[in-house]
Image (cartoon, grey):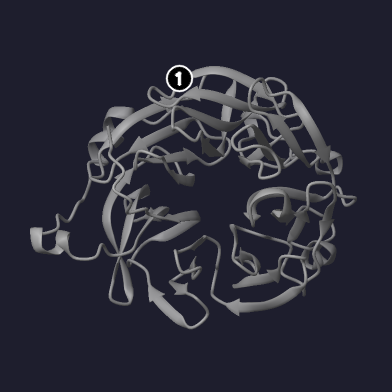
Amino acid sequence: MRPDRRRWLAQGTALCAGASPLLARAAAPLQLAAAWQGADGPAVGLLRLEGDRLRVRHAIAVPTRAHAVVQEPAGTWLAVARRPGDWLMRWDRQGAVRALAWIEPNRAYNGHVLCSADGATLYTSETDLDTGAGLVGVREARTLDKRDEWPTQGRDPHMLLWDEHAPPFTRLVVANGGIAIRPETGRMKLDLDRMDSSLVRLDAAQGRLAGRWQLEDARLSLRHLAWQGRGASARLGIALQAEHADAAARHAAPVLAHFDGNILQLAASPALAGYGGDIAATREGFIIGCPRAHGLAQWHRDGAWQRLTPLAEACAVALDSSDTAWVGGRPTARRGVRSVIGLPRGIQLDNHWCIARHDGAKEG
């Protein structure tokens, strides 16, 4: 049953700390949009850096746990319920909820959303709960209403990005996780012996299939995506999560695959407990938060292994304008490989966070 919308919207009014005029004229402090679990339940909002600690600037209660958070071109933020989820929400810099969409009957959100270049259209990863088929929902950004949906030629689609190997904003890449779920069993993973994970390209006009790739190991689920570089030479990094029945095989399984536009291949590393969380692309290569290996894993762009930087329950990753990685763990975070950053007391970060832009974008 869906949570009462009026109750959580009332609870979710921003807990904002207003800045003075003098502070507003100073350089804006770094802020991250995030989702977390707190004493009052699941929330999304902004965390602001103050000295060597992140503090809650504002928090908004949400009906259930959120997964991805994304900043729109206009400066507002979107949060999506983790799979199988039923809500998509927009909020602004003041912490006010601007729009909410409960998903259509017999559909579930899968935790990720992508914006068009002009911000007018949103693309959401979804599942048809009647058939288990994966879908991309095409939505009017202003209202969050769905105007179309396209099959992803797989099941359990997770993250989606614009394809760097095509003209800008003409083609999507989608990671089909390949894991079956059913409405009556919630997040329980079913039929793992029949997993069918894949990477697909879809044209952004009508959703036609433009390519499909799979790994030889069918028990590796393709989840999160990041482009390293731009244009024809760009390489796509894919964070993996292992679903092997054998615990030793699952523990030793790779957590990164990379794609050059033609070949999808695995990257080697020491055992990382078979679980890749969030992924980002640096100037050198790829980084993945590995919560079960308790560290930030790093590779060169060609898949050559670099290092594991320790951080308990590392998962969420984001890069600032200087290419420094911000990695969320528990009970602390990291800024780069040397600086430990405190997190607000009493919160447990969810899988993703993003550094807020300060580009003067106006919110309608």
- Considering every residue shown, the one lying at the far right of the view is 216
Quadrant of res 83: top right
Q: With respect to residue 99, does 77 lie above or below?
A: below
Q: Amino acid at mark 1?
A: Asp
Q: Is residue 105 visible?
A: no
* Mark 1 element type: loop
Look at the image and tell me in which quarter the C terminus lies: top left
Label 1 Cα neighbours within 10 Å, binned few <14 / some 14-19 / many ≥20: some
Q: Is residue 103 visible?
A: yes
Instruction: Report the side of 81 relative to 24 (left or right).
Output: right
Query: Mark 1 = which residue?
Result: 145
Instruction: Report the side of 361 relative to 251 (left or right).
Output: left
- Please report the residue visible at 28 percent of the width from the left and 65 percent of the height from the top: 29
Quadrant of res 313: bottom right
- Please report the residue visible at 76 percent of the width from the left and 56 percent of the height from the top: 258
- Considering every residue shown, the one lying at the far bottom of the view is 338
Mark count:
1
Seen from the viewer's position, the closer of residues 114 and 246 is: 114
Q: With respect to residue 353, does 179 lie above or below?
A: above
Q: With respect to residue 228, does 83 lie above or below?
A: above
Q: Position of residue 185 (x, y in %)?
A: 64, 34
Quadrant of res 24: bottom left
- Please report the residue visible at 36 percent of the width from the left and 35 percent of the height from the top: 90
Q: Position of residue 279 (x, y in %)?
A: 61, 58
Q: With respect to residue 58, does 154 lie above or below?
A: above
Q: Position of residue 196 (x, y in %)?
A: 82, 39
Seen from the viewer's position, the closer of residues 229 and 6 is: 229
Q: Position of residue 332 (x, y in %)?
A: 43, 73
